[in-house]
Image (cartoon, rainbow, N blue to C red):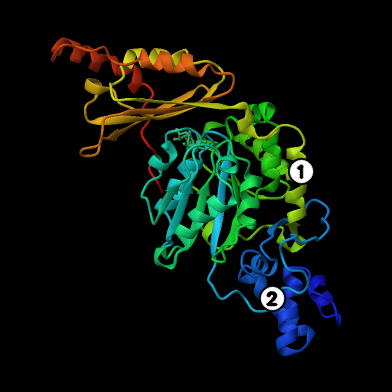
Amino acid sequence: MEAVLAALEPGREPHTGVEFCAAVVLELCGPPREMFTATFCAARVVGWSANILEQAEDSQIIRPATRPRPSRSRHPDRPRGRPPLTPPRTPQIPVIVLAGFLGSGKTTLLNHLLQHRAGNRIGVIVNDFGAIEIDAMTVAGQVGSTVSLGNGCLCCAVDASELDTYLDTLTRPSARLDVIVIEASGLAEPQELVRMLLASDNPRIRYGGLVEVVDAAEFEGTRERHPEVDRHLAVADLVVLNKSDRVDEAEHARLREAVTAAGSGAAVVSAAYGRIDPGLLFDPVQRPDEDEGARQLTFEDLFLEERAAEAGAEHPGHLHTAYESVSFTSDVPLDPRRFMSFLDTRPEGLYRIKGFADFGAGDRDNRYALHAVGRFLRFVPQQWGRGEPRLTQLVLIGSGIDAEALREELSGCRESARPGPDMAQDADLERSMWGVLRYVEQAPDTP
Ligand SMILES: Nc1nc2c(ncn2[C@@H]2O[C@H](COP(=O)(O)OP(=O)(O)OP(=O)(O)O)[C@@H](O)[C@H]2O)c(=O)[nH]1
């Protein structure tokens, strides 16, 4: 309210969204204070933080305050002075960044959103780390347009103009999208993505917030190895404490506290299998402490973070600098026993494996989607599509791994060539599938 009243001072330039709104009303209708009170309250009720402020604040990130308010310098490329008083004519599509460490459950959450999109048309940009676009393949539904950014981490592999090309595709009017979600690679720097979005020239988009997915079961270990995770949480607008089914109640409460503290006031929601209320993303987010005043992350903040990151190596502090990815494709089926033995003895540093395995005669009807995070392993049988090439496609991500040795080991898991049909061998293969089936978990029912 202070800000609204401040905007009533003659000759004062509006600096915040609230002041801006007040200035608009002041300019159009005159100054009665009661009206400002009513406008202010109404604006809050309809979700000012997501709509009114974001446009008025010239695309700055808005999140609740817990830190001192930074100086309000503007992006050097943006015009100075009074923001335009007319709202943009082109409808702007919110672009949400979905980030989180490897295996935290980003794709699972994205699939949940696609299946519960409440009539929204969602565009998806999937950025995979690894030569095979596994994540793009596992995003269900393919609602609207799906564009994969290809190999590598978005913050390094594409520059802003490339991202703009993808955004141009998704925002063309014929796509009629309501929301765009960018699923960042598990090793991407979310600040970089946000910076690129804010710097985008596309008039049809607006930054819609950063959702950071956290694996409850792995949080502490990940944080120990990668203190950068705190930095990611600190810029998040919404933190999803996922995999809450994997920790007990006391542990969950403790983790929630730790994540909330690291999140600098971002809303924290707990979830299993990414099942959050889509209204959190597709409708204005009502943050619990929003009347404390919105904390603005300015371009200066982002610039300073970037400068800090530049001091030293090419991308110091970026999670993916320490990681390497190995891709493996085979049109020869895998031998279940050999492959399980490979998985059982996988090296510590091999943090994430994802993709699809073809076990040939072991199960002719299904391919096996594979997810390994740390020591966690899970297979999900999925029926082969008609005419779908029978391929094993795997991406392995880890640090301190020997890529060549891994590829060799995987090659050694391929089924040995046989001269012709061999019923005894088929029966043996079927039996050896038990090793795989131990890790098959029925997908949970969606609510
Ligand atoms: N138990 C449990 N498993 C989950 C949950 N959410 C996701 N998973 C599983 O965790 C594994 C990784 O999930 P993904 O959604 O692929 O994770 P991701 O963050 O997209 O992974 P990357 O793209 O490698 O960074 C999969 O096996 C999921 O089924 C959850 O809430 N509970």
Task: Tell me the number on the disc at residue 307.
Answer: 1
Q: Is residue 116 placed above or below 228 in the rendered structure?
A: below
Task: Tell me the number on the disc at residue 116.
Answer: none
Residue 442 is drawn in which quadrant? top left
Q: For this rendering, which residue is in front, 294 or 173?
A: 173
**For mark 2, does the 10 Å Cα neighbourhood hold few (<14), some (14 to 19), or many (20 or more) residues?**
few
> What residue appears at the point 80 percent right and 51 percent down from the top-left corner?
67
Q: Is residue 180 placed above or below 41 in the rendered structure?
A: above
Kindly state the secondary structure of the residue where label 1 is placed: helix
> What residue appears at the point 74 percent right and 78 percent down from the top-left corner?
22
Mark closer to the observer (1, 2): 1
**For mark 1, does the 10 Å Cα neighbourhood hold few (<14), some (14 to 19), or many (20 or more) residues?**
few
| Ligand 1 within 8 Å, label 2 CB | no
Residue 112 percent location from the top left of the image: 44, 48
CA gap between label 1 and label 2 equals 30 Å
Question: Mark 1 is on which residue type?
Answer: Arg
Q: For this rendering, which residue is in front, 35 or 250?
A: 35
> What residue appears at the point 67 percent right and 35 percent down from the top-left corner?
315
Q: Seen in the image, is 405 located left or right of residue 55?
A: left
Q: For this rendering, which residue is in front, 273 or 104?
A: 104
Which badge, 1 or 2, is on the more N-terminal residue? 2
Q: Quadrant of the N terminus?
A: bottom right
Kindly state the secondary structure of the residue where label 2 is placed: loop
Task: Tell me the number on the disc at residue 84.
Answer: 2
> What residue appears at the point 69 percent right and 35 percent down from the top-left corner?
228
- Would you say residue 79 is visible in this rendering? yes
Residue 123 is drawn in which quadrant? bottom left
